[in-house]
Image (cartoon, rainbow, N blue to C red):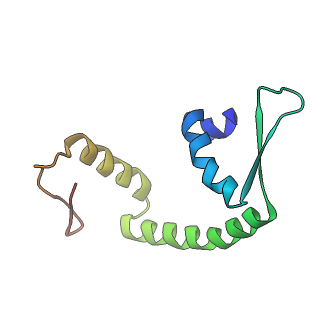
Amino acid sequence: MGRVAVLLAMDRTTLTAALKPLERRGLVTVTIDPADRRQRRLALTQRGRRRLAAAVPIWDREHTAIDALFGVEGPKHLHAIFARWCVTCTAEAPAMEFNGRALKC
C-alpha cells in the first residue's frame, strides 16, 4: 500500500480511509502480503475493472476539454492558478478572474 500512497501523493492513513468505501462497494480488495505480513496488497475486482474501464473514456474526454480550455501549458497553468488562489483565499477575498470567469473561494 505504501507504493500506491506515494504514487497518489497521499499518506497511508488517508489512502486506507479512501479505500474503505471502494472495498465495501466490491471494487477493490485489500489482502495481507504473504511475503511480509506487515504489508497490504491492493487489487481491483472484476467489478472494479469494469468501473475503471467505464471511467477512462470520461477521464480522457474531460482532460481533453481542460487542455482545449487552458492550452498546451494547461496543467501547469491550472496548477499555478490554484496554488495562487489557495494561498490568498479567505472568506473575505474577492473572486479571482480567469478567462472571463470569476473563481470564488
Residue 29 at x, y percent in the picture: 76, 50
Query: In the displayed structure, does residue 15 sit left or right of residue 69?
Result: right
Left or right: 42 as drawn, with respect to 66: right
Residue 66 % position (x, y): 43, 67
Q: Residue at the spot x=61%, y=54% of the render?
A: 21
> With 8 as the anchor, is 98 left or right in this view?
left
Residue 81 image point, x, y percent: 30, 51
Task: Give the mark count.
Answer: 0
Residue 8 in view = no
Using the rendered view, name the quadrant where residue 14 is placed: top right
Residue at 27 percent of width and 44 percent of height: 86
Q: Nearest the camera: 4 or 96?
A: 4
Residue at 57% from the left image edge and 73% from the top image edge = 58
Which residue sits at x=62%, y=38%?
5
- Locate the C terminus and report the quarter of the image it occupies: bottom left
Give the side of residue 97 with respect to residue 19, left or right: left
